[in-house]
Image (tube, grey):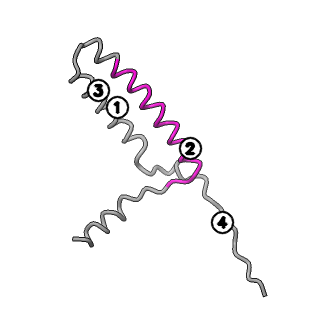
Amino acid sequence: MSDILQEVGKKLVFPIDFQAQKEVSKKLTVILSVGVLFTSIYGYITQSLFNLLVAYGVIILVASLVIVPAYPSYNKHKLQWVTPKVVQ
């Protein structure tokens, strides 16, 4: 069982660089902020908590599709490590 979980864990790693982490954080903040505003207004207009929750679920799904996959644009700025020097 643990072998299966380890394989699944390896498949779920989505590496992105530091610059992309900042961009993703900004995108996520904007998407969720606009989404909360939209869903609140939609729920108020329809007078339905159910509609509000469904709309919010759709916003979360859209945000996940935009943010979670490791798109190639998230790896443009590779980190250059300093090469070690051998002291003699």
Q: Give the residue number, with chain letter if any, for mark 2.
A: 22
Q: Amino acid at mark 3?
A: Ala
- Of 75 and 85, which appears nearest the observer? 85
The residues bearing labels 3 and 4 have C-alpha atoms spaced at a distance of 44 Å
Alpha carbon distance from label 3 to label 1 = 6 Å
Q: Label 1 near label 3: C-beta < 8 Å?
A: yes
Amino acid marked by disc 1: Ile
Q: Which residue is mark 4?
A: 81
Q: Residue at x 55, y 47 (%)?
A: 20
Total residue callouts: 4
Badge 1 local density, few (<14 within 10 Å), some, or many (20+)?
A: some
- Going from N to C along the chain, the mark reached first, 3 or 4, is 3
The amino acid sitting under disc 4 is: Trp
Q: Residues within 10 Å of mark 4 (few under 14, many from 20)?
A: few
Question: Helix or strand or loop: what does disc 3 sit on?
Answer: helix
What is the x, y in percent for residue 65?
37, 41
Which residue is pictured at 27% across the width and 23% down the height? 52
Q: Which residue is mark 3?
A: 55
Task: State the extent of the magenta-drawn residues as a range.
Answer: 16-40
Dots 3 and 2: beta carbons under 8 Å?
Answer: no
Residue drawn at 43 percent across, 56 percent down: 14
Badge 4 element: loop
Kindly report the distance in space between the C-alpha atoms of the residues bearing marks 1 and 4.
38 Å
- Residue located beneath label 1 in the image: 59
- Tell which circle, 1 or 2, labels the residue nearer the N-terminal end: 2
Farthest residue toward the bottom? 88
**Label pair 2/4, CB-CB below 8 angstroms:** no
